Image: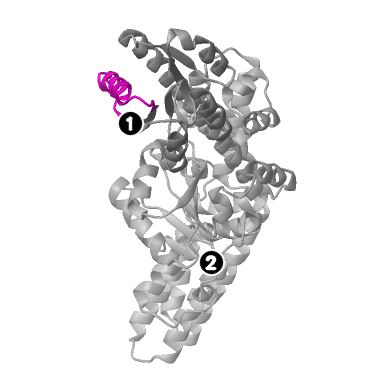
Amino acid sequence: MFTILIVDDEKLERNGIKFLLNREKEEFRILEAENGKDALGVLSSNHVDILFSDVKMPYMNGLELVQQVRERCGDMEIVIFSGYNDFSYAREALRYGVVDYVLKPVDPAEFSKTLQRVMDNIRMREAEEEQRTLQKDYLIKYFLIDYLYTGDTDNAAKLEKLLGDGGHILDRCVRMILVSAASGFFETEEEHFTGTLREQLQREFYYINLNSNESLLLFTEKYADYKTLADMLRRFLLKQYESDCYFAVSDAVTDWYSMPEEFRRLEKMLERQFYQPNQHVFFSGDPGEEKQDAPGEDSEIMEQITHDIQYRDIAHLKQDFGRLEKKYRSEKQFSEMYVKFVFSSILKEIYEQMSPADEKALSKKVDRLYRCRKISDVLDIVSTAVEEFEKCTQDQQDGFREEITIVKSYIYHHYGEKEIGAEQLASLVYLSPGYLSAIFKEQTGVTLNRFIRAVRMDKAKELLENTNKKIAQIAREVGFSNSSYFCRSFREFFGNSPESCRKGLTDEEDLQKVQEP
């Protein structure tokens, strides 16, 4: 709704203008003043979009009012009314940025045209400002994402320049939550769920999409319970979108300059989802991370050991096996057959991972365990199997360069497939998705999702620069079904839009554009 101030010393004239305004389809907030001096008082306490002013008034005429208004409110739209004898005043007012003038007596049709012209000016200016703000936000996210992943001080300097005087939300953010989803959730749902998320959380945050499966939320509250907040986020996304996500919650950060180091810790925490799939919220600095749990129930420990073996997490396998060993060494109430059943199950899982086709060798190992007479012998057999499993895993890790090469080659040749992901790639090299993700990050320094996105973006850039294909077609060819999401991803990855890339504009030129007044 536009706010209009009518300034005229004649009440009848003001009522006439109000009558004409009420005939328009638009709704207006209408304010009045009898002269220029009173008008300045109204302007000091109200935001006004359009000023309609008479020329001749007592105390301060329309021309003097226009001069002062233009100094105080540079963007305000100003229209003056003048009689034929006052036309010289009207021409003088045009020098001070008056949009138009209307001759008295006012012609209703002419007045309506002038009003529409003025409102169009406001809407055009607002649209340009919105576009400038949007472009600036894309660049802020582009430089921030690069800074988070690389710690590049050059991009930090560009980001600092964009943020300016400290009025941006990023300058107030003190906590980070990294969210991991599956099946391209943040590609298909991002446009719809961010607004709903703000309604759900009822708090200030800054949203950054990292790739189709990961997003980062930055919060401004210093003393909020972020572990509880992450649990609430998980329940909301599960209920609203049927997406079971994982969350890594950071320690407090003093400012955005310190975020890259904490971001790396968040990535590391999220890698644990593959080893602890039943835990969905990981909290930085949680004392429980390093502390060994007390002996628990069989089902809990056995379930964890199964995951340790499946994901070849040797460190946790030794830890969890130690918990089980301590339990059975210290507690004597279990039958001999039950103890042998428990440890033979572990033995089977270990050797099935090492030699899945050698059933005869496995049968001999299990038979030997069941013939043991002492608990210590049973534990020694399984402990030896754990050591063999560790050596086998280490040998495989030493040769993983070939698997990583195969995966990278497949990505380079199949980046256009929408469903390409950890599960599909893991099947190529006979590894579990979680284990492949972990060793890929370890050997390449980037996550699997980040690498896939980089390949797609580089190919998109090449097609934009060297072909005349439409942007929607290029989006499909590099694996994006949603062209608007592709455009946002391209901006955040390269710092400029696909259109700018095609025209040869650099991120520096785009940066200069959004900083122009």
Magenta-tinted stretch: 7-31
Residue drawn 67% across the image and 46% down it:
160
Which residue type carries mark 2?
A: Ser
How crowded is the residue under tag 1: few (<14 C-alpha within 10 Å), some, or many (20+)?
A: some
Quarter that holds the C terminus: top right
Q: On the image, numbered disc 2 is attached to which residue?
A: 284
Q: Position of residue 148 (x, y in %)?
A: 63, 50
Which residue type carries mark 1?
A: Ile
Towards the viewer: 349 or 66: 66
How crowded is the residue under tag 2: few (<14 C-alpha within 10 Å), some, or many (20+)?
A: some
Q: On the image, numbered disc 1 is attached to which residue?
A: 30
Residue 57 seen from this side: yes
Marks 1 and 2 in Cβ contact (< 8 Å): no
Towards the viewer: 10 or 472: 10
In the visual, does 18 lie left or right of 479? left
Residue drawn 51% across the image and 61% down it:
272
Residue 26 part of the magenta-drawn span? yes
The CA distance from mark 1 to mark 2 is 55 Å
